[in-house]
Image: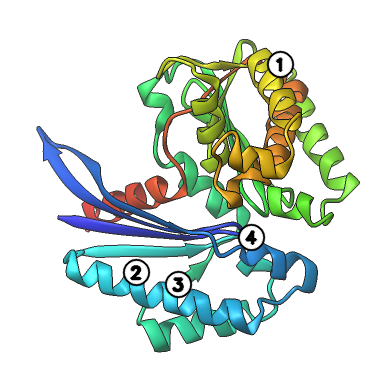
Amino acid sequence: MRYAAIDIGSNAVRLLIADIKENDGTVSFKKNTLLRVPLRLGDDAFLDQQISEKKCVDLVKTMQAFKNLMDVYKVNDYRACATSAMREARNGADLVKAIKEEANVDLEIVHGEVEANIIYSSHIEQDIDKTKNYLYIDVGGGSTELSLFSNGELLASQSFNLGTIRILDNQDKDDTWEAMKDFLRLHTKNVKNLSGIGTGGNINKLYKLSGEKEGSPLSFAKLNNLYNYLNSFSMKERINVLGLNQDRADVIIPACEIYLSVLKWGSIKNIYVPSVGMVDGIIQTLIEKNLSV
């Protein structure tokens, strides 16, 4: 079996094709092919509340390419989800219709809470220690999803309109930062020994830059030092000296700011960074859907 996941985010669009394995009744998957196209839909959506005609054309072409690849790879099932940028764009529904007509891809625009559910569907905590307390932190281009778990049970979850593209475009609001702070202080005040679980492209890149041994958590102090180090370089230097991609070199700074704020307000000293994201969660939802059929 082979499944595919499409994630249309505010910064980039991703396709993951995964091979499904079954061993002694346990179903898992192995990543086969992962593609990322930096379309930056959020620049249009957050500033103009509409995705430009050029980016609509680029997105449709990307979906056509993804559909052709899924056909060539003989994908058995797929799920395509769009998040914050498409949620806020006035022409989001029209774009969904165009993608169906021109690329034959069924696309769903998911709410923030559904996005959070998909992200923690990857069951990352089972590979660490599910008896402990964890805060899932997923920072995207347009939104940040927080989900608090204690002994494997979900205690609280909320999506905030706070993301890297939104900050770069000066579209983040003080009351959203305050709402996130209030959420964390309210729900974490009685939770002891809380650890973070960070997902998304920026935290994965930060983890690689930190040089931490795989599986080891990244400390607040080390992340803060890394933030100061990156901030000492210009955008051009982060590309030419540090070797970051152009579409990563700018967003990595506001991503650091969000992660550091969340860790500080939640009194979290360490964050685990498994190499997973939205597309991994989508594949897991497909596995669960097809198991129940």
Q: Residue at x 56, y 34 (%)?
A: 203
Q: Residue at x 27, y 74 (%)?
A: 68
**Residue carrying label 1:** 190
Asked if the residue at tag 3 contacts the one at tag 2, i.e. Cβ–Cβ closer than 8 Å, the answer is no
Asked if the residue at tag 1 contacts the one at tag 4, i.e. Cβ–Cβ closer than 8 Å, the answer is no
Q: Tell me the kind of residue under disc 1.
A: Asn
Q: Residues within 10 Å of mark 4 (few under 14, many from 20)?
A: many
Residue 283 drawn above or below residue 149: below
Q: Report, in whole angstroms, how far the alpha carbon at label 4 lies from the one at label 1.
A: 31 Å
User: Which numbered disc covers residue 84?
Assistant: 4
Which circle, 2 or 3, is nearer the viewer?
2
Q: How many marks?
A: 4
Q: Residues within 10 Å of mark 2 (few under 14, many from 20)?
A: many
Q: Report, in whole angstroms, how far the alpha carbon at label 2 lies from the one at label 3.
A: 12 Å
Which circle, 4 or 2, is nearer the viewer?
2
Counting residues from the start of the chain, the first of labels 3 and 4 encountered is: 4
Q: Position of residue 230 (x, y in %)?
A: 69, 30
**Residue carrying label 2:** 66
